Image (cartoon, helix red, strand yellow):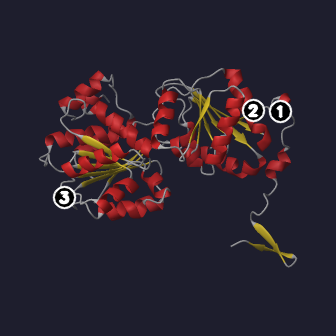
Amino acid sequence: MYFDELALSDEVLDALWDMHFDECTPVQEKAIPVILDRHDVIACAQTGTGKTAAYILPLLTNLAYDDHDPDKLNAIIMAPTRELAQQIDQQMEGFGYYVPFSSVPIYGGKDNGAWGTQVTGLQKGADIVIATPGRLLSQMNIYDIDFSGVKYFILDEADRMLDMGFYDDIMTIVRKLPKNRQTIMFSATMPPKIRQMAKAIMRRPVEVQIAVSRPPETINQMSAYLYEAQKPGFVQLALEGRNLKKVIIFAGKKQKVKDLARTLRTLKIDARAMHSDLEQSERDQVMLDFRNGKVDVLVATDVVSRGIDVTDVPLVINYDVPHDPEDYIHRIGRTARAENSGEAITLVSPEDARYWKRIETFIKQPITRLPLPDVLGDAPQLNQYTSRPKGSGMARRKGKFRKRS
């Protein structure tokens, strides 16, 4: 389906034309008409499927046609991270180029100027607020904010927000909103806690399901079985062998991210770290340099596994195996975007074998195993991957085994 077949406003269609967007993605084709009809919507769609446009385009159209107070807040879009809030704000600028609506991003950081801009936008009634839950709640605790004009409440990556512990914050914000509003929720997964929240804040929602439980076939998935100490050497050889730009390496903890980025720089590999200890201005600069090709390798925690729009990443390396199969999907989904192909390599140590097995079961396919280069020494034996990890499952007590509760 093409965008001009949908009941979008002329101004929105003009912006899409300028941006060379013609054909809808599946989630856009299914979600936009339902949102335009002003139903509450709960949509299950993964990052990289075009979900942001799936709610921004009908939101801008509905605002154009609706009778709303231009001096009050009219729409709130919630996002789990500053990076995703920034991305939404950037897309809002593009899609809303020809519409007379104002938007203000509300997210954390130590930029005093940004705080002042956020306060002004909230108090003077920006049409659209794009916010992280914690930051918006902080503003609400300090200032008297009028939410009486809010007609649209959108939650992007709702599952991620709940995983990060924002349920209570979201519910506090919801209690300040008018009951007569349209609520839209996008989530990559649909666990019971999402349905519980949907039941609490939505009215007869229409469900939109875009089943993408497996990575796209354009991603060449590979794995390497090795010891933890062999990982830096393997990464060095993998990068040198491909001579690639814009590579993302995911590690499980921020200290490991810092250490690995430092190690790669000593190996003459242009690497930068991305983690939550960085100031907002530092994170913005790292991402800008990475997008512009000034940095070859981005070493990151899961803070960038979702919601970052970098379309030309040829290789993703999972330095650590993610414990959740869904996180694996989101991590490797940073490559093979915008009709490109890509590669994903996961480094599997004996300690992480059980998580890797869970991922292979989840995606219902075995992953190609790469041989370990001779220069790195011997790989672990297979029996090291099949033996029971220490402390898992059973514990010894008084000469007998008892099941852990």
Residue shown at the point (34%, 54%) measured from the top left: 136
* Kind of residue at badge 1: Leu
- Identify the mark at residue 223; answer none if there is no mark: none
The relative height of residue 33 versus residue 138 in the rendered view (above or below) is above
**Residue in the foreground of this view, choosing between 30 and 221:** 221
Query: Which quadrant of the figure contains the N terminus?
Result: top left
- Answer whether labels 3 and 1 touch (C-beta < 8 Å): no
Question: Residue 107's spot in the image, x, y percent?
Answer: 38, 48
| Residue that numbered label 3 is attached to | 148
Image: 169 above or below 255: below
Q: Is residue 79 left or right of residue 177?
A: right
What residue is shown with label 1? 376
- Disc nearer the start of the sequence (3/1): 3
Percent across and percent down for residue 104 are: 29, 43
Q: Give the image quarter of residue 259.
A: top right
Instruction: Bin the neighbour count of mark 2 within 10 Å (Cα to Cα): few under 14, some 14-19, many 20 and up.
Output: some
In the picture, measured across the screen, residue 6 lies left or right of residue 256, that is left
The reply to whether dot 1 and dot 2 touch (C-beta < 8 Å) is yes
Q: Label 1: few (<14), some or many (≥20) within 10 Å?
A: some
